[in-house]
Amino acid sequence: MLGSLIKNQDKRESAAVVEHAFSLAKSLSIETLLIQISSRSQMKRILEKRTSEKIGWILMGERAPELEDKQDVIIPVPESPLTRVSQMRVALFLAVAQGFATPKESVIALSGAFGTQRLDTLMILNAGIEFPWYQKQSKALENSDLPIQTIERVISWALRLATEGREGRPIGTIFVIGELAEMQKYTHQLILNPLAGHKKKLRTFANTGFFETLRELTGLDGAFLISPNGTVETAGTYLGAASENARTLPGLGARHTAAAAFTSRCRHTIAVVLSESSGTVTLFQGGDVLLKLEKLAPGTKSAPSKRAKAWLKTPKRAKITT
C-alpha cells in the first residue's frame, strides 16, 4: 500500500515538474529541453505537453528506440551513479558537442534520482556559463574530428572504473583521445606497450569484453592513448608535453596537471582523467577543464530499475511516434 502511494505521488510530482518546464520554456522563449527518461510511457506523457519545442531524450546506455520526430535526439549518458548536476552537465556537454544545442543558448533540463522514473529537478543551463571553455574555444571540439560516441564511451568506462575500482581499491588513470601520430610526438613508453600486436577489434571501447583487460592495465603508471575510433593504442605511456606555459591547477594532482599540459600542447586531443582520491572524472582540452563529473556518495542506490533496463534493450529500429 505504501509503495503504491509513493509511486502515485511520484507520478503527480513529476507531471507537475514537466508541466512547469514547458510553461517556463514558453515564457522564456527557450526552444530546447533535455529530459531524462527511462520508459516509453514516461516519454508519451511528456510528449502530450509539448507544442513545438525540441527535446533531447537523456537515456542511460547506448541502445535506444529510433525517434520519429527528426528534431529530437537521443543523448546516451553513462550508466553510472552520478549526482543530478553531473548527469545534466554531461548531457548538456554531449548535446552541444553533437550540435543539438549551441554554447550560447539556454536550455531547460529535467532530471531525477538515478535509476528511477521520478523527475524532481528542473534547471536552466547554458553551456557558455557552465563550461567557460566554450567561451574561448567554442569551435575547438567541432574541429577536433573526435567522434562523440568515442568520447561518451571513454567517459562511461572511466565512471565505471571510478565506481568499481580494481580489487577493492580506487583507480587513478588518464585516457587521451586523438590521432596517434600526433600524440606520439609528445609521449614515450614507460614500459614496452602491452597492447602492441593485438588485433584492433579486441582492444576497442566497442568491445565490452575488453573492459576487464583495461581495468588490469590501469595498474600501470602512465596514460592510455586512444584513436578517434575508440581503439586503445598504448598503455603505460608517459605524457611529456609539459611546457613553460603549463599552469598548475589548484587542488588537482599530477595526473590533472599532466593532462592540462598535454592537451595545451597537443590541441586536437581530449584527456579524460580519473582521480584516484575522489573518483571524480575530469575532461581537458586545450589546457582547460571541459567537464567535471562527480559520482554519488557511497551507499546511494545506484542501479537502474529493471523496467528501465528492459526498455533500453529495445532494438534501435523500433519507432516512437510523436
Image: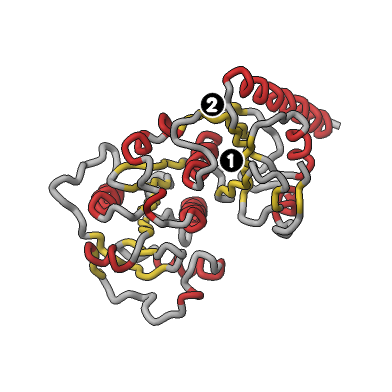
Tell which of 244 and 158 is nearer to you: 244
Looking at this view, name the residue that lies furthest to the left.
244
User: Of the residues shown, which amino acid type is indicated by label 2?
Assistant: Ile
| Discs 2/1, front | 2
From where the camera sits, is residue 131 visible? yes
Could you tell me which residue is drawn at 54 percent across and 30 percent down?
107
* Residue at which label 1 appears: 300
Tell which of 193 and 48 is nearer to you: 48
Q: Position of residue 223 (x, y in %)?
A: 33, 61
| Whether residue 37 is situated above or below residue 108 in the rendered picture | below
* Residue at which label 2 appears: 124
Q: Position of residue 149 (x, y in %)?
A: 51, 56
Could you tell me which residue is drawn at 51 percent across and 51 percent down?
163
Could you say which quadrant of the image residue 214 lies in?
Answer: bottom left
Q: Position of residue 271 (x, y in %)?
A: 35, 53
Tell which of 159 and 32 is nearer to you: 32
User: Of the residues shown, which amino acid type is indicated by label 1?
Assistant: Thr
Q: Secondary structure at mark 2?
A: strand
Query: Are the residues tagged 2 and 1 within 8 Å (C-beta)?
Result: no
Q: How is the image coloured?
A: secondary structure
Q: Position of residue 177 (x, y in %)?
A: 38, 59
Q: Secondary structure at mark 1?
A: loop
| Whether residue 283 is situated above or below residue 63 in the rendered picture | above
Q: How packed is label 2: few (under 14 Cα within 10 Å), some, or many (20 or more)? A: some
Q: Is residue 295 left or right of residue 131?
A: right
Cα distance in 3D space between marks 2 and 1: 26 Å
Q: How packed is label 1: few (under 14 Cα within 10 Å), some, or many (20 or more)? A: few
Could you tell me which residue is drawn at 31 percent across and 37 percent down?
136
Q: Quadrant of the C terminus?
A: top right
Looking at this view, name the residue that lies furthest to the top.
27
Q: Is residue 190 left or right of residue 21?
A: left
Q: Quadrant of the N terminus?
A: top right
